[in-house]
Image (cartoon, rainbow, N blue to C red):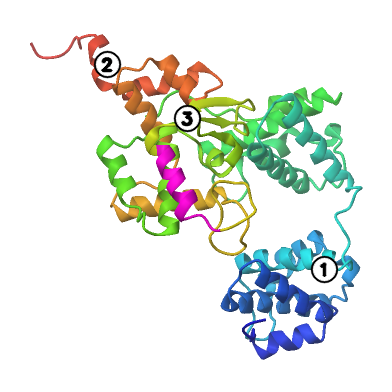
Amino acid sequence: MKNEVVIPVQARTWLENSVLAPYIPQFSSDLQHKGYTVETMCGLLSCVGHFAAWITQQRVSLAEVDERCIARFITEHLPHCTCASPVRRSRDSIRVSLPHLLETLRACGVATTKSTRPAPLQQELNRFDRYLDEIKGLTQKTRRARIDVIHRFLRQLGVSKSPRLTTTQPAEVRKFVLGESKTYTPGTIRSLADTLRSYFHFCAFSGRPAQRLLDAIPRVARWRLAPLPETLSDQEVQQLLDSFDQKTPMGMRGYAMVRCMTDLGLRGSEVVQLQFSDIDWRNGVIRLVRNKSRRTDVLPLPEATGKAIAQYLRAGRPQTSNRAIFVRHHAPLDQPVTIRVVQKAVAQGYRRCGLPYTRSHILRHSLASRLLRAGSPLKEISDILRHRSFDTSMIYAKVDINGLRTVAMPWPGRLL
């Protein structure tokens, strides 16, 4: 290594006295290859030192170091940690360092790979995931959120394998949805109820009677299209775009990503999934093949958007073999950006120009509002935003105040 990585004496001692000791040089080399700085490597090695102390105390062998072992360390040890200082207890740092360690151990052939035969409870969750994917057509993000909720529900019931719904009581369902020790918001209750409802429908689909549990799920009042979507004015959109420093690589990347959302109405998840093969520069179109609707959509590529992407590719994008258009500029390198990178870039842009917003999805709403003001019909807006249902686009009619004035009936009680 070019620079020596110096970690606290306590962490170094823990590493040297653990079964991990022979593999730490390779682990450090892997971190350096991924582009981590010496300072960051020191922190990650300190986290691994803490983990090494715990597996030594628990007498965990190398063959037992896997995702479940890491989960035990995070959920069982960290909340009650009494290890001698200085010690790294940051969950975020540990969640970053230990998967890298596991990757190194598996590359060295000393750690077991993921089990090819999951536990019965995991098999149940896997079947539910396939149902959500193949029957309901939900995206991976939505499926993951629902799987997490059902996992928590089954664990709360003490279920360790495929549940027998005949032993599950309606009161247990209501207790989970309404919360035990804290008051849930109506939105949270509705989300939990929808998730349980989809799971019980899956159980019925699998031949397990679940009607009495479906009837036990509390219902929350829901008024469709009730809220007004937040939108930016044309001036605010321009302020946001102007807030990016296009002389820096990250500024070019942020500007290009935001142009994709403001000009094309792309979701953040669609921005991170863009590949070189998705843009047809000759014909001036962009193809979305990994989007929420699970179909290939072709959109015209506006000149300003194309210029922003091209400028980033020529002058801002790091050299990498990854085919994603927007890639990471910091370790771990050679990977596409995540949705959090997009959200952070937008949120920082809001702060720089003093706008009181945080969500990146507002840019999608703003495009719809801008098209509506320009006279575009709702059907055209629905096609551009690629909504599955035309009803989803109807909410934007509520932000067309001028148009609503032309159809508003006079108020009977107004003063003459």
**Location of the C terminus (image quadrant):** top left
Q: Which residue is mark 3?
A: 284
Could you classify mark 3 by the number of other residues whose Cα lies within 10 Å: few (under 14), some (14-19), or many (20 or more)? few
Residues at discs 2 and 3 in contact (Cβ within 8 Å) = no
Q: Nearer the viewer, residue 277 or 77?
A: 277
Q: Dividing the picture into quarters, in which one does residue 192 lie?
A: top right
Secondary structure beneath dot 3 equals loop
Query: Residue at position x 73%, y 33% from top?
Result: 170
Per the model, the C-alpha gap separating discs 2 and 3 is 33 Å
Q: Which residues are magenta?
A: 305-318
Q: Nearer the viewer, residue 70 or 208?
A: 70
Query: Residue at position x 60%, y 46% from top?
Result: 324
Per the model, the C-alpha gap separating discs 3 and 1 is 46 Å
Percent coordinates x, y for residue 282 in the rendering: 50, 31
Q: Which residue is mark 2?
A: 403
Q: Nearer the viewer, residue 167 or 296?
A: 296
| Amino acid type at image mark 3 | Gly
Q: Dividing the picture into quarters, in which one does residue 237 lie?
A: top left
Using the image, tell me which numbered label, if any, was put on residue 105: 1
Percent coordinates x, y for residue 72 in the rendering: 77, 64
Secondary structure beneath dot 1 equals helix
Vertical placement of 89 versus 124: above or below? below
Per the model, the C-alpha gap separating discs 2 and 1 is 63 Å
| Amino acid type at image mark 1 | Leu
Q: Nearer the viewer, residue 177 or 375?
A: 375
